[in-house]
Image (cartoon, rainbow, N blue to C red):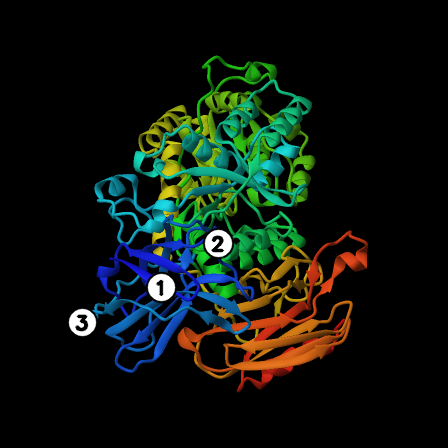
């Protein structure tokens, strides 16, 4: 459908691509179109500051004449060039009442303090007709029960992911306009930080590298390789997102695997790579996929949230595990607090989540619902992939240099920390030294650096002098050297108490080695179906099994053969395919920016996510629009224009929203509006703390919008001599939403704000 429409602001043309599809009042509906303006020059659109130009739409019930929903259309460009088509989408949520016949009105609009202020002539673009027969949506596939250990075969019911075979057999649905414009954007911020201190990748960094290498070298499925992709990282020096050319990243990856490179030469090479980086220009529809662990990067989620809110990108984190939340006894207390804060924020703003195992999926889903009350859709990209073999099959000589004998040592790879349960291995090798002749006891070779809480294992090791001859600890090996150690090992052991995946177990499988491993968490998914799995707390079973393997050659041979026959190892390109498919599905499935659920009675904090906070719930997911400055240790300043909070509640019960703010360096005049219905104005003295109480009633979909305007923001450049050029309004400290009838929560909040407990 194409038509030329006249507006008081512009003359423009509209072309809808799927308007004939109709709409569903009880499910979200998306329309795809394009717009062309006839104006004198390029026009900037977007944003929610007063005076900003947007493409707006309204849906009106033809029977009653009521306007039942209005919003901004989603433009795929921030600048409209005269006589050039620009794509857009219209996202209509599920409506609270049955509407079969409606009208869709579209026009350019001007933003003001109170939503849309100036409109062109209201033009009926299209008639919408919903089907008269309601068809219930299929129920989503549930996650496995918490604690379940699954490695589903293709025939398992309701899988959380589609295997490559099943995906190949499924006809691909036509791509939408948003999907056609989407880019896969891989955030490697933590990899770039890691490379500053380390040359050779380990763990999560190795996963990132192998996935990206497969994509850059186009080993992935052709249909997924059609979409453009790039890699980005946040550059702390310039306070901006940078894009690294794919070929330069591939060169850096290959260099990191070079055994002979020194740290000094590596850093020079890394600096040269950074010089090739260019500014990242976000595009609507971009899917930012974070393959690494970002919880330790200061203010990371704020940086991502700005991209989501200002450019409409999708954020898809790969959460490798929730170990600090599931097994906090194995982590430093500060790490647990910091990770919990990051996890809350990450799952709250995530449009989709990728995990590496069913076990991790259970953990992430359960923890997200406990901490936020909700969880985004989860996809699984299992890491059962073989790391690339060295370029040459010639041995590095490491076995001879260490005075080891081939197939006369047992290998254990992993960080030396309490969670990995090395104390069990030390106790078993002490027992073997007493039970067998010394020449029959294989050496135990540990590969990994020391981590948290290794004191208990170290104490067990120091008590038995025999262990000093039987145990060899290694660190900082090249991939070629580690590969030789795998090839020469008798078998491998992995008695970890808990894992998100367990890469060393899969590595052993890829080298054809039997592994004796734990039977908990994700380890059975990482192991061969023929490996020996034992409860990590059952010391006697571990000792008896290892004793039999080192003393009964026939049993070892048979067990190794079964492990190899039942191994399930694939290419890293297959892992990359699963990740890209999850991102592609997310772009298609998410019809609108999700509004985060607020938990009644929970106090939310506006401080930086990685700062020590009074309350362990971040208000970051509720921030909307561009009217915010970055989070700081104490809270966040509002920026000029409209500062907006957006959230949804669980029920239609009347509530109070308490919003705690503080004044700036000068007295400020502010206006607070609630759902475009209630307005409050007052003056806030400098450095004075004020608690606004807003009455929250019912609204469509139980969504609420709080807007604040500061009429006389402070220019910090005048106060700091140009050191800080921001213009700031009020400082946001805390917020809480409480039902009228919940007197206890109201008192708890007021008590928390007024009193300091020791």
The residue mark sitting in front, 2 or 3, is 2
Give the residue drawn at x 45%, y 15%. Answer: 393
Residue where numbered disc 2 is placed: 43
Q: Is residue 23 above or below residue 294?
A: below
Q: Which mark is residue 682?
A: none
* Residue 705 seen in the current view: yes
SS assignment at label 2: strand
Q: Quadrant of the C terminus?
A: bottom right
The residue mark sitting in front, 1 or 2, is 1
SS assignment at label 3: loop
* Residue 387: % across, % down: 44, 29
* Residue 373 seen in the current view: no
Query: Label 3, label 1: how many angstroms apart (C-alpha)?
Result: 36 Å
Q: Is residue 21 above or below residue 571?
A: below
Residue where numbered disc 1 is placed: 6
Q: Is residue 715 above or below residue 685?
A: above
Which of the 4 image quadrants contains residue 634?
Answer: bottom right
Which of the 4 image quadrants contains residue 608?
Answer: bottom right
């Amino acid at each position: 459908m194409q038509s030329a429409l006249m507006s008081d602001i512009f003359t423009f043309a509209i072309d809808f691509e799927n308007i004939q599809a109709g709409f569903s009042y009880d499910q979200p509906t998306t329309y795809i179109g394009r717009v062309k303006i006839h104006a004198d020059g390029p026009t900037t659109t977007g944003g929610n500051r007063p005076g900003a130009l947007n493409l707006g739409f309204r849906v009106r019930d033809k029977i009653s004449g009521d306007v039942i929903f209005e919003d901004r259309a989603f433009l795929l460009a921030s600048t409209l060039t005269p006589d050039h088509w620009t794509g857009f989408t219209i996202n209509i949520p599920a409506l609270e009442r049955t509407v079969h016949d409606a009208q869709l009105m579209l026009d350019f609009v001007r933003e003001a303090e109170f939503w849309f202020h100036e409109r062109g002539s209201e033009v009926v673009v299209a008639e919408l007709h919903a089907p008269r027969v309601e068809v219930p949506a299929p129920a989503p596939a549930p996650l496995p029960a918490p604690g379940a250990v699954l490695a589903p075969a293709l025939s398992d019911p309701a899988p959380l992911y589609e295997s490559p075979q099943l995906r190949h057999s499924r006809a691909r649905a036509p791509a939408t306009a948003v999907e056609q414009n989407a880019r896969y954007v891989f955030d490697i911020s933590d990899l770039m930080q890691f490379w500053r201190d380390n040359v050779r990748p380990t763990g999560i960094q190795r996963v990132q590298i192998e996935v990206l290498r497969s994509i850059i070298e186009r080993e992935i499925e052709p249909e997924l390789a059609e979409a453009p992709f790039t890699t980005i990282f946040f550059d702390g020096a310039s306070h901006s997102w940078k894009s690294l050319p794919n070929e330069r990243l591939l060169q850096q990856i290959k260099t990191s695997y070079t055994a002979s490179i020194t740290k000094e030469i590596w850093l020079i090479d890394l600096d040269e790579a950074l010089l090739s980086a260019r500014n990242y220009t976000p595009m609507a529809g971009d899917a930012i996929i974070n393959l690494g662990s970002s919880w330790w990067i200061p203010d990371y989620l704020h940086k991502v949230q700005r991209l989501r809110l200002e450019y409409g990108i999708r954020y898809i984190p790969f959460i490798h595990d929730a170990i600090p939340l599931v097994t906090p006894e194995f982590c430093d207390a500060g790490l647990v607090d910091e990770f919990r804060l990051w996890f809350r924020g990450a799952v709250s703003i995530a449009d989709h989540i990728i995990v590496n195992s069913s076990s991790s999926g259970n953990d992430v889903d359960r923890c997200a619902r406990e901490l936020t009350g909700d969880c985004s859709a989860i996809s699984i990209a299992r890491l059962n992939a073989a790391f690339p073999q060295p370029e040459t099959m010639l041995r590095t000589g490491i076995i001879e240099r260490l005075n080891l004998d081939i197939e006369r040592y047992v290998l254990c790879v992993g960080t030396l920390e309490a969670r990995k349960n090395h104390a069990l291995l030390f106790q078993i090798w002490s027992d073997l030294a007493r039970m067998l002749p010394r020449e029959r006891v294989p050496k135990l070779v540990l590969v990994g650096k020391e981590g948290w809480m290794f004191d208990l294992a170290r104490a067990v090791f120091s008590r038995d002098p025999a262990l000093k001859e039987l145990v060899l600890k290694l660190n900082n090996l090249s991939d070629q050297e580690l590969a030789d150690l795998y090839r020469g090992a008798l078998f491998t052991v992995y008695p970890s108490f808990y894992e998100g995946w367990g890469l060393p177990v899969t590595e052993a499988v890829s080298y054809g080695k039997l592994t004796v491993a734990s039977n908990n968490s994700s380890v059975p998914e990482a192991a061969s179906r023929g490996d020996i799995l034992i409860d990590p707390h059952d010391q006697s079973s571990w000792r008896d099994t290892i004793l039999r393997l080192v003393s009964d050659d026939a049993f070892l041979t048979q067990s190794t053969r079964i492990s190899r026959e039942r191994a399930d190892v694939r290419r890293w390109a297959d892992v990359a395919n699963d990740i890209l498919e999850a991102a592609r599905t997310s772009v298609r499935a998410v019809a609108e920016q999700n509004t985060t659920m607020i938990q009644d009675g929970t106090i939310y904090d506006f401080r930086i996510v990685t700062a020590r906070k009074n309350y362990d719930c971040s208000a970051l997911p509720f921030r909307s629009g561009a009217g915010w400055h970055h989070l700081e240790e104490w809270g966040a300043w509002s920026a000029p224009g409209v500062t907006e909070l957006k959230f949804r509640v669980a029920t239609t019960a009347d509530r109070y929203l308490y919003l705690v703010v503080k004044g700036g360096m000068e007295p400020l005049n502010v206006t607070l509006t609630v759902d475009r219905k209630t307005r409050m104005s007052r003056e806030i003295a400098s450095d004075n703390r004020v608690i606004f109480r807003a009455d929250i009633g019912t609204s469509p979909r139980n969504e609420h919008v709080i807007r604040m305007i500061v009429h006389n923001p402070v220019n910090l450049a005048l106060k700091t001599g140009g050191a800080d050029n921001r213009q700031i309004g009020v400082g946001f400290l805390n917020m809480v939403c409480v039902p009228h009838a919940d007197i206890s929560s109201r008192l708890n909040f007021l008590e928390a704000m007024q009193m300091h407990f020791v």
